[in-house]
Image: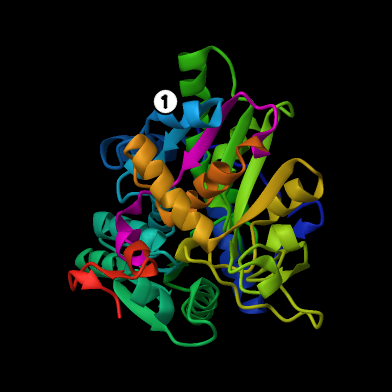
Amino acid sequence: MPISYHEERHFGEFGGQYVPETLLAPLEELTEAYKTFASSEEFQKDFKRIVSEYSGRPTPLTYAQQLSRDLNREIYLKREDLNHTGAHKLNNAIGQILLADRMDKERIIAETGAGQHGVAVATVCAYFDKECIVYMGEKDIKRQSLNVYRMELLGARVEPVKTGARTLKDATSEAIRDWVTNVENTHYLLGSVVGPYPYPDMVRDFQAIIGEETKEQFQTQTGTDPDGLVACIGGGSNAMGLFAPFLDNEEIELFGVEAAGEGIDSGRHSAPLVTSGHGVLHGSKSYLMSDEDGQVQTPHSVAAGLDYPGVGPQLADLKEKGRLQVKAVKDDQVIKGFKYLSALEGIIPALEPAHVFGLLAEEPDWLGDCEQVVINLSGRGDKDVLEVAEYEGRDLLAGGEAE
């Protein structure tokens, strides 16, 4: 599937470049590199070869027989959990490392929450023999220790971030500080459709392979397009990757699920689209969790990959225009969703997409009249098994109950 360059510095009122002057030149360098290389025949050939021979694409589109029966509609799962490294994150990492290599950047930095993006970046840096530094909040390092070890095995240096809430937002801030200081030899391999232009466009386009494959696979299996597309939303790369190739067909409904954490009213959540505040974070304007003084609120989710107070600007625009329907799911529902899909289909989801299954288990009518639906199963749950057990009061490593 060809990668196309789409220049969209703004999506309605959202997006843009709200950055220190120091970053304007490297952002322009990155923009020019993306314009020049992304659509070139050589780049396309390299990208296609690596995602096929190394990453294992295309990932399957699986008809979920038991889930379909339980929800009384046809449910298909786009199996990004079967992508190399266990999630959709590798698609974007491959695209950006190819750009970084062409830009002669030998030092790669990244942020990570659940660790899946960090693992993907460490993987491509090993493959391309690049130095790799991954910033990760101290809290996330503790709850995603397996992925931390995987990154270290792959040769990355994991830098703990001890400021703020010590989660994804703070890791992103620290990565940006590093980039400001080391722009000459460093590429910031941002993992989601957030940040200043061109990142929201570029990450979406690299992740659009998800939707392109889905469109072709769904046509082959059913002879038509799906009625609805569903994805969990943190920053939003897995959602935009699925949605992007279908945006021209307004008859297809788009559904997003955010993290309600301990409840919207508690303030301990990660649901900027549901709460509808606007603001600027990490270089772009979007929906943002902020207080009445405009200060960014501390997010919370049982899923480290959704523990972010903002969202990609294109998703904000889709919500603003009424194109995207969004609900938020509390932590206890997420745990139920994790177990629900596991028991029904023999597929253990990551906690991030488990938000979708937790919602559908309790509100199957949320999908309205959609009879044929694709859910982006954006990652597998290996990384989360210990945390889910701990949430339920079990200490698997000790072989008993958690204290």
Left or right: residue 359 compared with residue 145: right
Nearer to us in this view, 234 or 54: 234
Please, is residue 333 above or below residue 53 in the view?
below
Q: Is residue 294 magenta?
A: no
**Is residue 262 toward the left or the right of residue 141 in the image?**
right
- Please name the residue that numbered disc 1 is placed on: 65
Q: Residue at x 52, y 62 (%)?
A: 331
Q: Residue at x 46, y 78 (%)?
A: 182
Which quadrant of the figure has residue 224? top right
* Secondary-structure class at tag 1: helix
| For residue 29, side relative to residue 368 (left or right) | left
Q: Is residue 224 left or right of residue 278?
A: left
Residue 212 in percent (x, y) is at 51, 30
List x then y, in percent, for residue 288: 71, 67
**Residue 60 appears at what percent x and percent y?**
37, 30
Q: Looking at the rendering, which quadrant does residue 42 occupy?
A: top left
Q: Residue at x 67, y 51 (%)?
A: 327
Residue in the image at 30% along x and 81% along y? 403
Hey, what amino acid is under mark 1? Gln
Q: Nearer the viewer, residue 374 or 85?
A: 374
Tell me which corner region of the image, top left, top right, bottom left or bottom right, holds residue 281: bottom right
The magenta stretch is 366-387
- Is residue 106 at all visible to an observer of this figure? no
